[in-house]
Image: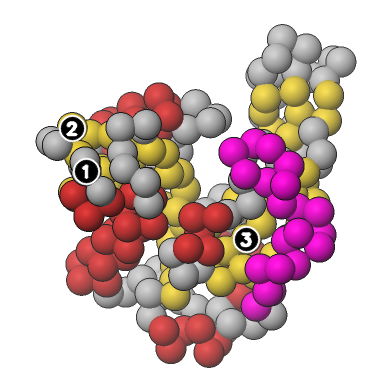
């Protein structure tokens, strides 16, 4: 039986990554402006993908780590794994991606990502992968439209929000330090993981804990 040690992680073309994300990500949506795309293979078959790129508003995030330059950080925009991958493939794939990034993109000092505690989960994989929790925020920007579509209630004009249901939940912000010295320059407190449950933000696979 295959294990997480049997997976192969390597750069892939953007279109291939988008196809996997659209197939397996709970949102069904890939990120169009991602810059780095990694595929996760098992027995030669592409079964997972990770997309890294610029965040929506880099200016708001840079101050999280003192003296960060424009190109010091990147966001893990999307990550999706198919059912054909072994258990613990996510954390192993993330570790391999970070190893590749340290080697080929040494200018990158830290990685930010957000866990969707409204629809998906509270970041179990991030915690297992060595990320630091830096924010637990209530999130009221996600709505379910009358036709069942779930979308953000801002930044778009193509949807009719009449009769939309506003979903209640949380967004959790995590940071991983590719450069361990950068952690010393973190300007916000590191939040103990136990605070997730205390805040009522626990979620796993779309179910409240």
Determine the secondary structure under disc 2: strand
Q: Which residue is mark 1?
A: 2
Residue 153's spot in the image, x, y percent? 75, 32
Question: Is residue 123 in sight in this rendering?
Answer: yes
- Residue 152 falls left or right of residue 61: right
Earlier residue among tags 3 and 2:
2
Give the alpha-carbon distance from disc 2 to disc 1, as whole Å.
13 Å
Residue at (65% x, 78% y) in the render: 190
Q: CA distance from mark 3 to mark 1?
A: 32 Å
Front position among marks 2 and 1: 1
**What range of the chain is rendered magenta?**
190-209
Residue 173 badge: 3
Decide whether residue 74 is among the magenta residues.
no
**Nearer to us in this view, 187 or 131:** 131
Residue positioned 38% across, 74% down in the render: 178
Which residue position holds label 2? 45
Q: Find residue 94 and report its image quarter.
A: bottom left
The answer to whether one can see residue 59 in this image is: no
User: Residue 138: where, in percent of width, then height?
Assistant: 80, 51
Picture quarter containing residue 97? bottom left
Please check the rendered image and state whether residue 200 is part of the magenta-colored stretch, yes or no: yes
For the residue carrying disc 3, how many other residues have a C-alpha within 10 Å: few (<14), some (14-19), or many (20+)? many
The span from disc 3 to disc 2 (Cα, nearest Å) is: 32 Å
Quadrant housing the N terminus? top left
Please tell me whether residue 64 is drawn above or below residue 151 in the rendered image.
Answer: below
The local secondary structure at tag 3 comes to strand
Judged from the image, the secondary structure of the residue bearing numbered disc 1 is loop
């Amino acid at each position: 039986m295959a294990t997480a040690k049997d997976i192969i992680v390597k750069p892939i073309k953007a279109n291939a990554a988008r196809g996997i994300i659209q197939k397996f990500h709970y949102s069904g949506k890939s990120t169009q402006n991602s810059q780095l795309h990694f595929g996760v293979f098992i027995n030669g078959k592409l079964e997972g993908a990770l997309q890294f790129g610029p965040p929506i508003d880099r200016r708001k995030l840079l101050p999280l780590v003192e003296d960060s330059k424009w190109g010091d950080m990147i966001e893990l925009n999307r990550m999706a794994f198919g059912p054909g991958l072994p258990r613990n493939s996510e954390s192993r794939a993330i570790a391999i991606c970070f190893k590749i990034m340290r080697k080929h993109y040494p200018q990158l000092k830290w990685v930010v990502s957000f866990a969707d505690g409204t629809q998906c989960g509270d970041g179990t994989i991030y915690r297992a992968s060595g990320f630091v929790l830096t924010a637990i925020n209530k999130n009221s920007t996600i709505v379910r439209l009358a036709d069942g579509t779930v979308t953000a209630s801002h930044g778009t004009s193509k949807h009719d929000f009449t009769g939309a249901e506003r979903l209640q939940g949380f967004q959790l912000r995590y940071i991983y330090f590719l450069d361990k010295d950068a952690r010393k320059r973190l300007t916000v407190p590191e939040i103990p993981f136990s605070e997730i449950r205390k805040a009522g933000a626990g979620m796993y696979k779309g179910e409240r804990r």
